[in-house]
Image: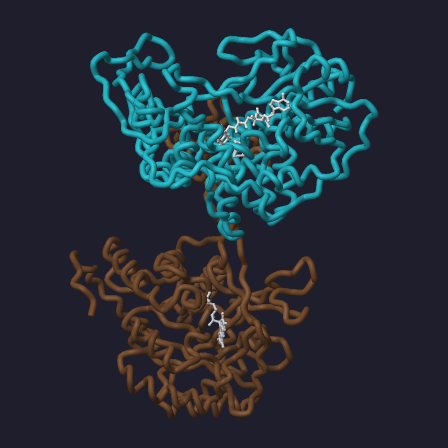
Chain colours: A cyan, B brown
Amino acid sequence: MFDLLSPHVAHREAWRCLVCWDAPCTAACPVHVPIPEFIARLRSNDVVGAEELVREANPLISTCGEICPDEQYCSRACVLRDAEGPIRVRELHRFVTASAHAPWPAWAPSRPERLAVVGAGPAGIACARELAALGWGVDVYERDAAAGGVVRHALAVGRFAVERLDSDLDALRGAPITWHMGHAVPSLREILESYAAVFYAPGTHRDVLLDLQGEDTLMVSGMEFLRGWRMGQGLDLTGKEVVVVGGGNASLDVALTACHAGAARVVLVYRRGPREMPVWRRELEQASSKGISVEYYAHPVGIIAEAGVVRGLQCRRTRLVDHGGRRPVPEDMEGFDFILPADVLLRAVGSEPERDEDVDVRWGSKATVPVTEAMETSRRGLFAGGDLVSREGTVVAAASHGLRAARAIHRMLGGRS
Amino acid sequence: MSAPALRPSPTVNLETAFLGLRLENPFLLSAAPSTDDLDMARQGLDAGWAGVVLKTTSVEGTPVPLAYPMMSAMEWAGRRLVGMGNIDLISEHHIDAVEERVRILTREFPAKLIAASIMGSRKEDWQSLVWRLRDAGVHLIECSFSCPQGSMGERAGAMVAQSASATEKVAGWVKEAAEHTPVLIKITPQVADVVEIARAVKNGGADGITASNSVPALMGVDIDTFAPIPSLGGLGTYSGFTGPAIKPLTLRTVAEIARHVSIPISGNGGICTWSDAVELFAVGAQNIQICSAVMHHGFRIIDDLKSGLARYMERKGFTSVSDIVGKALPHIVDHDELPRRTLRSRIDESACLRCGVCFVACRDGGHQAIAMREDRLPVVDDERCVGCGLCPLTCPAGCIRMEIIP
Ligand SMILES: Cc1cc2nc3c(=O)[nH]c(=O)nc-3n(C[C@H](O)[C@H](O)[C@H](O)COP(=O)(O)OP(=O)(O)OC[C@H]3O[C@@H](n4cnc5c(N)ncnc54)[C@H](O)[C@@H]3O)c2cc1C
Ligand SMILES: Cc1cc2nc3c(=O)[nH]c(=O)nc-3n(C[C@H](O)[C@H](O)[C@H](O)COP(=O)(O)O)c2cc1C
Ligand code: SF4
């Protein structure tokens, strides 16, 4: 979590913006937050007006104000990036959403027919908001007891204040949305029969496995571990030596939470080198400041256990081989094995969707559902978004899918915008 | 004790003279809060200021009904004090206190210039103020003809220096009493013709002009309550506007006087740095008085003022501040005497940030002569560019210049 800018500093930062004529930052943002426009409102101290603009563009703006990886989006495109550092757009979002709450201008009376959203993660929330804003009644089905998906259940403790998500949900009060919580949709078939259009955004919630012997009993799922801590009943790791297998952002959340859980030492095992690690700089810095170390070029090959008690993780050194592909491939170096001592092994190498075999939707490679530009699947009337359809893996990308799908559904059903 | 400098500071002598008085450097603290307290005046002098003009005083019994808060600011672009506003009045300390301070300061600081500012209404008041200061050994007397809250002159709310006849008359009273003690008249820039006022000062017999005091201004309006800023329980009044924002007004005021009237000028209004000061010397000021910059950043700014000026003089080969005085005047002409030339905007692509600020400015406020290329670089259309010079001003990278086309 980061300190909130003071009004004066936010004002100064807003004035630092050059207001480029073509807003490369806006173009780089998946939901195209109108950055120069909201910054103009900040400059004139119309904070409520600024909030209105950013929230309209991004229903998860309070959340994004805290955890959007702006370094890969708006900040990266800022013309001041190399000259003097990019405008701190994300922190300005956070400032406006923390200081002001523009009430949504009265929700349009909704049409009698209702539409369905399955999964209340960022993608589902954004879609429901946009459908409601376009005048549709929406039924949202969510397996969990509360909306938010990964954002509520998986971010490292201490990295995200869940109040930010709640404030995004607060902004939807009064919307013609019925939230069916604790309602898992077992099969899409039925739902597709009762609604003219369905937006499907279940995320990816099945752990990718490592294929190690004894993995199912001797390794802990990183996502389960995170969820436990987010739900206030986390696994206590006091004094334990912990090894996390992973490499992506989620594995950093797991490692950070392991620190929070009292671990004496946390080591992250990654197959490639530091330059290949697909993580956000900001999160990596946070992890190293907590003393988390990374064992690069290491591939887990076996769990060391005695009488059902974990003792360590056997790893094999890897080296990167360039096969002319997009990324060099890590290859095992036979005979270069070593053991990392550990009391607890956490697995965080990714997750994949649970397939709904009941619906004849086409699946793509890499366990994603291919969709059109309008987020429609191969089955007419079924739209999909979020982690299910893309590996981008950010809240703002998921939100952009939800918004795009809602607008496409609206058009499909003959609505005018 | 300061540490020995690794590199010797410039050796230029900043000493200068004004109205026959020696100044160790050309920077004085003007009549304001910083000089309204004996210890503060001492601290300012200790810090290195060449002298003080003690805050304007008056005869005993003169009511000084201060109202608080008195300060306000012009904020712009996230900068807090682009300009400063005050609804202060003259000093609450009457001549009895100020003559005592003059005695102490002239004794404690024999090498510094100790001046005092006065304001009265009747001839007897003006003259008794002068006599008492002379007795106390003051080096120079400044007369405030320009308090924005109105002088105790003729009309309530009006300043003496807004009337040429009043200026000449009162300047005459003061000079008559001052005899050999030099007299400065501090004027306001808020007049139709400052040259006429400067002539009146001269005709009245005063020795020099302080140009100029704060500019009457309304600092703002609270858009919730519609109270003026600063608001005193919902009511407000006009302020005296000072600080960086008014420098261009001061430059013009001083230049106008220097171009048309032969009279020594102490420059004042909006000066913050040594280069501001050089500009004011160049249009005719012989020394500089400063108030707002000190109120904002403290007496310590004297350090940069002195060293920056010395380094500048060394670089330019000036041996005395007087070498700079008036240097810009021959270059100031009337509009019809300006050369007519052909200019075109030239953009250094290698330094361009590709923000398009110049493009928008020219499109909506120039001559629509800049286009943005596919790769986000601005290009100037020489056919459309008239050479107005707007775009370089807007460029955050400073990579645009105007080229003279033969
Ligand atoms: C540890 C971790 C850290 C991350 N950190 C960041 C970050 O800092 N910044 C960032 O931008 N992104 C981050 N991400 C990524 C981001 O959280 C996801 O990309 C985003 O949440 C995807 O949204 P989604 O709506 O597709 O899926 P989810 O968030 O997974 O939501 C899907 C929802 O659908 C529900 N659901 C599933 N199946 C059913 C069903 N059959 N019936 C009813 N409901 C169902 C689930 O319970 C869940 O609530 C992080 C992800 C992880 C795992
Ligand atoms: C709070 C305040 C009080 C002032 N009081 C006096 C005063 O009593 N007499 C006077 O001649 N000028 C007074 N001035 C004007 C300053 O001496 C000076 O002329 C003016 O501020 C312009 O210079 P600057 O831009 O450096 O501040 C005052 C200015 C301020 C800000
Ligand atoms: S949502 Fe994210 S990418 Fe878009 S403007 Fe905000 S911080 Fe930048």
Whether residue B388 is visible: no
Toward which corner of the image does residue B190 lie, by quadrant? bottom right
Comparing A383 with A291, the one in front is A291
Q: What x and y, as percent, mark residue A360?
A: 64, 6
Q: What x and y, as percent, mark residue A10?
A: 51, 48
Q: What x and y, as percent, mark residue A277?
A: 36, 24
Toward which corner of the image does residue A104 lie, by quadrant? top right
Toward which corner of the image does residue B42 lie, by quadrant? bottom left
Left or right: residue A272 versus residue B223 is left
Relative vertical location of residue A3 with respect to residue A140 in this rendering, above or below: below
Whether residue A52 is visible: yes
Counting the numbered discs, the total is 0
Left or right: residue A190 versus residue B37 is right
Relative vertical location of residue A70 with respect to residue A319 in this rendering, above or below: below
Comparing A389 with B388, the one in front is A389
Relative vertical location of residue A51 with respect to residue B296 in this rendering, above or below: above
Image quadrant holding the C terminus of chain A, namely top right
Q: Residue furthest right?
A: A112
Residue at 26% of width from left, 64% of height from top? B320
Q: What x and y, as percent, mark residue B363?
A: 57, 33
Residue at 61% of width from left, 13% of height from top? A356
Q: Residue furthest front?
A: A307
Relative vertical location of residue A383 with respect to residue B213 in this rendering, above or below: above
Left or right: residue B224 versus residue B252 is right
Comparing A34 with A359, the one in front is A359
Residue at 32% of width from left, 39% of height from top? A264
